[in-house]
Amino acid sequence: MPISELLKKDVELYKNNFGLIAGYVAWLLLPYAGLVLFTLPKSNAFFETITFSCSIIQGVISLWLAVFIPMVIREIVLKKEKISLLTIQQQAWKILPSVVFVAILEMAVIFGGFIMLIIPGFIFWVWFALSQMTVILDGKKGLAALTHSRELSRGKFWPMAGRLIAGPLVFGTFAICLCGILIALFAVITGTSFDSLTGVTPPLWADIISTIIETFSLPFFLIYFTLLYIDLTSIKKSE
């Protein structure tokens, strides 16, 4: 599938299912609200413990969403008449440890490649980029997930590399530009100076705007890689 088609389908899927997807992603804002609330008072052991706990909760929810959303998108793409969200939620929790384990393996291999030379690291990154998706969508585990990702990219290295870079680059640039525009507008409205925005401790409202944009941009990336994996899998089956 051309990059432009992947991007277009990504935006359409998110737009058509915004209420469902954004409703789950919004849960990330709850622990963030706790971080904001408990970092405002004077720092002490109690508040530091609370903020640390909120950070852990936020991280766990992020990992779970990275599993849950691709599973839901697959059901939508396959046009399943009835999607059991409760079942998918439970499945996402069950396979989460396997996804984390494969992510660690993937990072270790890629890091090893970069230690040897930059080029091997880049090659390994392209080969194993979809390893976690193989766990989520095909139930592969451990080294089998890495092997399956390698097979999907076989004979398609540069097209695969282009798609791995293009999608995140487009959505990342859009998110950064939107965030910058909103912060600039709010700075003008509130009379905030540029120096305070770029200082060591920028205004809290700037951090809130940035976090909200990042949170609701996350599905773009997850949907993109899900569509890429489904596309490559269908090609592999037809070969």
Image (cartoon, helix red, strand yellow):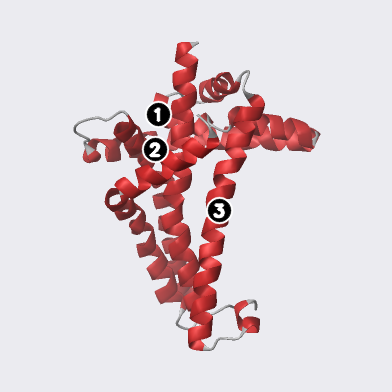
- Circle nearer the N terminus (2, 1): 2
Judged from this view, the residue extending furthest toward the top is 239
Instruction: Give the residue at the far right of this rendering.
Output: 117
Q: Residue 60: x and y, percent? A: 42, 50
Identity of the residue drawn at 49% across and 32% down: 228
Q: How much space separates mark 3 and mark 2, taking CA atoms?
A: 19 Å
Reading the image, the residue beneath label 3 is 172
Q: Which residue is found at the position 56% from the left and 63% from the top?
A: 177
Name of the residue lying farthest toward the left? 82
Q: Secondary structure at mark 1?
A: helix
* For the residues bearing labels 3 and 1, Cβ distance under 8 angstroms: no
Image check: 169 left or right of 207? right
196 or 143: nearer the eye?
Answer: 196
Which secondary structure lies at badge 2? helix
Quick one: label 3 or label 2, which is nearer the N terminus?
2
Q: What's the residue type where badge 2 is placed?
A: Pro
Q: Residues within 10 Å of mark 2 (few under 14, many from 20)?
A: many
Gap between marks 2 and 1, in whole Å? 8 Å
75 lies above or below 65: above
The numbered mark at residue 70 is 2
Can you identify the residue that label 1 sits on?
137
Camera-side mark, 3 or 1? 3
- Of mark 3 and mark 1, the one earlier in the sequence is 1
User: What amino acid is labelled 1 in the image?
Assistant: Leu
